[in-house]
Image (spheres, grey):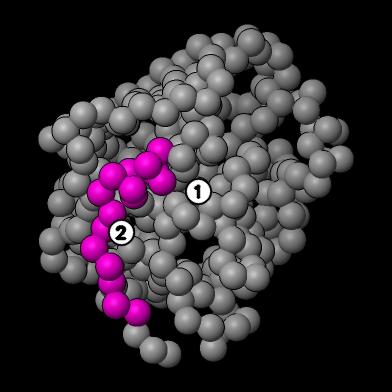
Amino acid sequence: MTIWPSDYRQAWTLASSVEREGVGLHSGAVSRLRLGPSERPGYWLGWLDAPERPLQRLGPSLVNDTRLCTCLQLGDRRLATVEHLLAALAGTGVSQAELLVEGEEVPLLDGSALPWVEAIGEAGLQERGERQEPALPPLPLTLQQGSGFVVVVPNDRLRLTAAIDFPQAAIGRQLFSLDLTPERFVAEIAPARTFGFREQVDQLLAAGLIRGGALDNALVCDGDRWVNPPLRYGDEPVRHKLLDLLGDLALVGLPRAHVFAYRGSHGLHTAMAAALAVQAPLPPVPVPIH
């Protein structure tokens, strides 16, 4: 049984490397991803099929598409659906790691962050000293897009709150809030799976999306019922929204703040991550020559 860090005050990396392979949610193509230790703060991305390329530090400035996932543009290559993996790393306390990828999308696995948590537990953790996280301005930050908004208020610890409001009776209005710790993330957030709506399937497929979606890696809502129950939690949809929020914030780091997202989206989450990066950028890290 993995013993997770008690909080997010220290820096942690992986003790060894671990790989996972699977289909991407939107591309439907098989990809492979290797997680490994890093001596440098942050998450660094490289390519298994192009090892000569230097690793690049992930950050909100790389976001180039937020339609139903968070997609990053790295030079002439892109990587989609990074949010579940980044949530697993950040949520379990891993603040620095190398991600080596073969493919254009992070494997979806079961649609939650739990398989990535299990991979991190398999690799083990190694402490790296005090964590570097962005300091916050003294006043709250607020961003709004349409009827959704995200507010970040300085706090003595990380607290996340998500609220959703859907017309489908099976979901309706849900709210979930918690003071996040690695242990609570693993028990209460990581297993929550992505979800979608039966009436949107044909439209999304025609748009070139959800080609890898299936009943074993996504919950499907059909009005007042779920096509593929049972749910892992009675409020699994809002917990997954909180998982997505955490994964998108991981692009800039985990501030000691209360972050509240109402009707959040990847576009809104990553815009807040970018705003946090502008307000209090992390110290630069030297990039070694490979």
Q: Residues within 10 Å of mark 2 (few under 14, many from 20)?
A: many
- Return the residue at label 1: 83
Q: Residues within 10 Å of mark 1 (few under 14, many from 20)?
A: many
The residue lying at 53 percent from left, 17 percent from top is 147
**Above or below: residue 63 compared with residue 13:** above
Residue 134 at what x, y percent from top left? 23, 50
Q: Which residues are magenta?
A: 272-287
Identified by mark 2, the residue type is: Val
Q: Nearer the viewer, residue 146 or 17?
A: 146
SS class, disc 2:
loop
The residue lying at 71 percent from left, 49 percent from top is 26
The residue lying at 50 percent from left, 12 percent from top is 173
**Above or below: residue 250 compared with residue 30:** above
Res 221 quadrant in image: top right
Residue 67 at what x, y percent from top left? 65, 40
Instruction: State the count of labels.
Output: 2
**Above or below: residue 13 compared with residue 256:** below
Res 209 quadrant in image: top right
SS class, disc 1:
helix
Mark 1 to mark 2: distance in Å?
A: 14 Å
Magenta segment includes 3: no
- Return the residue at label 2: 94
**Above or below: residue 99 compared with residue 178:** below
Residue 109 at what x, y percent from top left? 59, 53
The residue lying at 71 percent from left, 38 percent from top is 215
